[in-house]
Image (cartoon, helix red, strand yellow):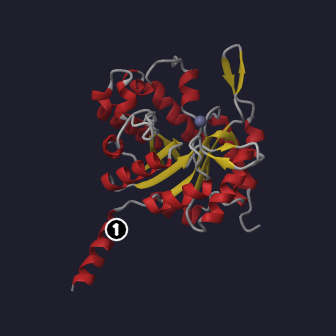
Amino acid sequence: MQPHRTESIAKLKESIVINKITQLLKTKKILVSDGAWGTCLMAKGLRAGECPELWNIERRSDVLDIAQSYINAGSDMIETNSFGGNSITLKGFGLDRRAEELNIAAAEISREAAGDSIVLGSIGPTGKMLITGDITKDEIYDVFSAQAAALEKGGADAIIIETMSDIEEAALAVKAAKDNTTLEIICTMGFDISAGGSYHTMMGVTPADFTNIIVDSGADIIGANCGNGIDDMTPIAKEIRRTSKNIPILIHANAGKPEYENGAISFPDSPSKMASAVVALIKAGTNIVGGCCGTTPEHIVAIKNIISDYDFTQ
Ligand SMILES: [Zn+2]
């Protein structure tokens, strides 16, 4: 009887996990995600040194406006304003005790804008390094457990762990989110291109290493975000797809490489420039396309138009 019992528990567990995105991918082949949040918050007046997550309480209507702008642009899924919402990052603003409140509010705002569309609860890195002993594995696991649980409580449909560079931190975040929510887990890292043309994170992780380790950690969807424009994301998607045939791939590319002038950052890729590279990204194996730094609702409209017109039987 024992094997039978184990099997039925596994089945039960599977049935309570909400697989909204992977279900939707069965009917809608390619999904469109959202664009940058930081870029939009800055456009609304967020200053350097200010805590973006505090806006979920103090500037709620501005955050709702950003969420709404991506839904209006045609995003099938939008993120939450909680990238730095782990209690370690919030401690830098003296707001660690408000972590749960700020994450719940982040998810509630995006839920309100999204309606039936999907809400991805955003989790970014702690900014502390395991390798230098700045933080322990248990601390990382605990802060991400609490953040993921609060995002689910506020109404997120999935968790997106993003802009990771340390594979160990990423794997701990995936495990924490998996253990403490019933949600689908997405994990993306930021990869840089080397002089030799290969890709790796700041900590030396290749897209193939990342794929093997993070799929084993239990992520449902994986990919890359930030660091690159869309052209440089295509080889990364190819390498992930070569390593795993079936895992859904999400890519959030920047609007090109940042340019610095008079202390201001700008991103060169226009919506049409970015949209022109979307078909190559899909052919490389990408299932979900959105944007990172420098992208706006206009970029998402252009990406959505290309995807709507694309003949997937080609
Ligand atoms: Zn970015």
Residue 235 is situated, as x and y percent measured from the top left of the image, at: 72, 53
Q: Is the C-beta of the residue carrying label 1 under 8 Å from the nearest atom of ligand 1?
A: no
The answer to which image quadrant residue 261 occupies is top right
- Which residue sits furthest top? 262
Residue 259 vs residue 26, the one in the foreground: 259
Q: Is residue 18 above or below residue 230?
A: below
At 66% from the left and 58% from the top, the residue drawn is 239
At 35% from the left and 68% from the top, the residue drawn is 14
Q: How many marks?
A: 1
> For the C terminus, which image quadrant?
bottom right
**Residue position marked by numbered label 1 in the rendering:** 15
Residue 82 is situated, as x and y percent measured from the top left of the image, at: 43, 35
Q: Is residue 311 above or below residue 100?
A: below
Q: Is residue 138 above or below residue 128?
A: below
Q: Is residue 100 visible?
A: yes
- Which residue sits furthest front? 132
Q: For this view, does 190 lie left or right of residue 105? A: right
Assign a secondary structure to mark 1. helix
At 59% from the left and 40% from the top, the residue drawn is 202
Quarter holding ligand 1: top right
Residue 264 vs residue 103, the one in the foreground: 264
Q: Inspect the image, locate mark 1, and give the three-letter code of the amino acid beneath it.
A: Ser
Residue 248 is situated, as x and y percent measured from the top left of the image, at: 56, 60
Q: For this view, does 307 lie left or right of residue 121? A: right
Q: Is residue 58 above or below residue 246?
A: above
Q: Is residue 157 visible?
A: no
Residue 149 is situated, as x and y percent measured from the top left of the image, at: 31, 45
Badge 1: how crowded within 10 Å, few (<14), some, or many (20+)?
A: few
- Which residue sits furthest bottom? 1
The answer to which image quadrant residue 192 occupies is top right
